[in-house]
Image (cartoon, rainbow, N blue to C red):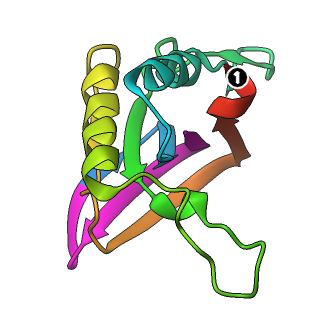
Amino acid sequence: MKFVVQRVTHAQVDIEGKTVGSIDKGFLVLIGIAATDTKQIADKMIKKLIGLRIFDDENDRINLDLATVNGSLLLISQFTLYADCRHGNRPGFTLAGAPDMANELYEYIVSECRKQVPNVQTGSFGADMKVSLLNDGPFTIILDSTEIM
């Protein structure tokens, strides 16, 4: 599982010209699910995500977590995080989770995050989405379950 976490001052996702999710201060999270991922892996990734201390404190040190700054989440499913570009110029996606399985895990992640974060917005699994953001910093972190387990 991979999370690309971007600290934002604003982010939104549009589908067919309509905004379906929008946040101000918080994290825009692009979520990639591999064929081998499980709910147990998701739980560890969620814990790491929610606990990230990457907001500035009163001394301009990155020391505060999402809850402390009353931050929000915008969660976007993105299977292309598992693109395999080792051969040729056209990426393969065999490492990504099958759509039914990946959607189930994505919905699980959304549900679990909503238990801990008051404002969780989402895109729509499998949709053609237009995502816009104002990256704060810029500050982007990649969480990879193979590195934090």
Q: Nearer the viewer, residue 14 or 113?
A: 113
Residue 103 position, x and y percent, is 27, 47
Residue 34 is at least partly visible in this image: yes
Examine the rendered structure and indicate whether residue 88 appears above or below residue 40: below
**Secondary element type, mark 1:** helix
Residue 72 position, x and y percent, is 39, 31
The stretch in magenta equals: 1-20
Q: Main secondary structure of the magenta part?
A: strand
Q: Quadrant of residue 142?
A: top right
Q: Nearer the viewer, residue 33 or 116?
A: 33
Residue 9 position, x and y percent, is 52, 45
Q: Residues within 10 Å of mark 1 (few under 14, many from 20)?
A: few
Residue 69 is at least partly visible in this image: no
Q: How many marks?
A: 1
Q: The C terminus lies in which quarter of the figure?
A: top right
In percent of the image, x 36 and y 55: which residue is there?
A: 98
